[in-house]
Amino acid sequence: MHIALGGCLKAPPIRYGLTDDTGGHIAYILAAARAQAARHDIDRVEIVTRRFDAPGLDAAHARAEEPLGPKSRLLRIDDGCADYLSKEALEAQVPAFTAAFLDHLAALPRKPDAIHAHFADAAAVALAARDRFGIPVLYTPHSLALDKARAMRRPDDGMRRRIEAETRAIAEADAIVVSSRDEAERQVCAYAGADPARIHCIAPGPTLPEGAGPEAARALIAPELTAPEKPFILAVARPVEKKNLAGLVEIFATTPGLREHANLVILAGLRGPERLGSAEGRRVIAAIEAMVHEHGLEGRVALPPEHDAGRLGALYRLAAAQGGVFANPALTEPFGLTILEAAEAGLPVVATCHGGPSDIVARIGHGLTADPRDTAGFGAALSRLLGDSELWARCAEAAATGGSAYDWDAWARRVSGLLAEVAAPRPVPAPARILASDIDNTLTGDRAAIADFAAWRAQGHAMFAVATGRTLSEARRILSEWEVPEPDAFITSCGTEIYIRDETGRLRFDASFAREIGADWRHDEIARLLDNPSIRPQPALEQRRWKLGYLGCARQAQRIRNRLDMAGLAARVVASHGNLIDVMPVRAGKGAAVAHLARHYGLTLEHCVTAGDSGNDDCMLRAAGHAIVVGNADGDLALLPRRPGLHRSRGHHAAGLMEGLARAGLCPPVADNIDAPIAMAAE
């Protein structure tokens, strides 16, 4: 069961922008419900929202029930108020809605197995249902207030209350489902009570409608343009200030040559007489219109007051056909469904570097990112993409081929697994053996071999942990994409963080390991020392509390070691993959983390098998009783000394892992020429 209180939620078609709150979250919920209803392991999907009867809005909103498909429906709860309420006005109505919703649940012959709440107001309702009926709660924030509040000099009381509601939802939900790494690792984790073990980055799919024909799109914008045949920059966003639409007009006006080469088209919601708009929306539209007049852009900027879903889809495709670009100039963007819509239409993008769009553009490769506060820089990115035909073609090709990374069926598969985990956590039985394996290029790289590994894992020969340089959310994403079974434990960020299952089977951060490695860790002093133009840092999301990441080769890593030694700062410096350098506490590392994990279960390193392919695996490959170096390993591991228990596989990726497991006596030999297994330590 999904719950969403705000906006005009109904069966398609949706008039996006009809109210300020009728935006992308509605497309998300409807697409999610459709994908879940298509699964054989889901019996029913229900979406719950408010019932209201407002003049000018569709009569469907007054109906108690609306079918969505054979296995899905939309239910509307009467909370005693017949008015349409904006997000701000909803706050006072949540208690009445909660009471009515609990009455609805009490009368159901079968309760939902899980509730997925969208925004913090719905999370408050869902948590009340969990308190009364024990139903697990998933929470998707969609847009968090803390970033916005930090940008305001004096956040008002409404913003403070919203942050309080979000804090409670983040602290208490059984699982949090977000769409981008930025949401998972920066935005949500900025809240008190956030637990990375409960945060799941599960990317949605695109929501672009099929669209009408190109003539419908041309008819929408041609009346406002002097030369409608030119390439055009397309922006689609609600008229709210954080979307920075007036800033885009400024960029368009002041970037040399841009207005001569292209037009600008902005879809900023609907502005018909029936629209229930806000004062903020009116301010944004007025600012756009004033900017157009101030810069003399009449005939070069189209701001259509009305559009429907079909013409929206057609407009994306027309922009691509005319060699245009999609622009998202938001000051911050939690995810960016419009970036996916552009990819689905084959339209290259220039997107804000703040928030989720950076994730999307990096994975698909269909455009550029820039800081919208840097007017010249964002404008230069637009000019470059519009003016470089080879770059534009590469981005358009990436859009056509790379969009498959975002898929609603994959979203539904991962969320279905998450629901099963939340509903029935699985305790880890006391293990006799532990396998700790790297992920990238050790487990991943050969899907057929992963299937063999999954079959081995299902037989329960050993406890399975991953030991990776990735963060927890990224590790989960990669494992899911490669369909690797969920591990019993995670060693992440190059052996600086451990997540282990408690007695109930729920994954928890291991605070005892953090205390162990953090005793003499001088993070801030090391960061200041290495803040030098000659030392390039890895992206901000790779910087962790117990790990600092840099870019460079083994020689540069040695220079960093020397610099730290001269300053008297104790740290471990690890080079891997020829271009990554990680600086961490001296007591940290994958080897130390595996040893800590073994002690937790009353085992020693002799009971452990480790597998890896690169320099950051070196310490655990040296330490474990049995170690597997896969056949495709980097040269970083060439100097590992020969020793009993170390096996260099001929097979690559998971095939090499399986070969090593056979060598360690944990599965039958995978080939006739595999040596007989060496006895493990006594159980």
Image: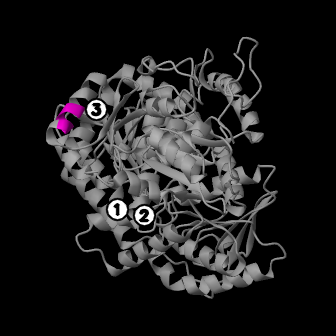
Q: Which mark is residue 147?
A: 1
- In the depicted view, which residue is nearer to us: 278 or 391? 391
Could you tell me which quadrant the C terminus lies in?
top right
- Could you tell whether 30 is left or right of 389 in the image? right
Tell whether 463 sits left or right of 120: right
On screen, residue 366 versus residue 29, left or right, reads left
- Residue 250 to residue 188: above or below: above
Report if residue 263 lies within the magenta region: no
**Residue at mark 3 to residue at mark 1: CA–CA distance:** 29 Å
Q: Nearer the viewer, mark 3 or mark 2?
A: 2
Q: Amino acid at mark 1?
A: Asp
In percent of width and height, residue 585 lies at 33, 45
Q: Secondary structure at mark 2?
A: loop
Query: Is residue 642 shown to the viewer in this render?
Result: yes
Residue 487's spot in the image, x, y percent?
63, 45
Give the percent coordinates (x, y) of residue 258: 26, 35
- Rate crowding at label 3 as few (under 14), some (14 to 19) or many (20 or more) other CA atoms within 10 Å: many
Sequence order check: which comes first, mark 3 or mark 1?
1
Q: Marks 3 and 2, how far apart in space?
A: 32 Å
Quarter of the picture containing the N terminus is: bottom right
Q: Amino acid at mark 3?
A: Ser
Q: Secondary structure at mark 1?
A: helix
Residue corresponding to mark 2: 144
Marks 2 & 1, CB-CB < 8 Å contact: yes
Residue type at numbered disc 2: Leu
Q: Position of residue 246 (x, y in %)?
A: 29, 54
Badge 3 or badge 2: first in the primary sequence: 2
Residue 383: assigned label: 3
Q: Residue 29 falls in which quadrant of the image?
A: bottom right
Q: Residues within 10 Å of mark 2 (few under 14, many from 20)?
A: many
Colour pattern:
one colour
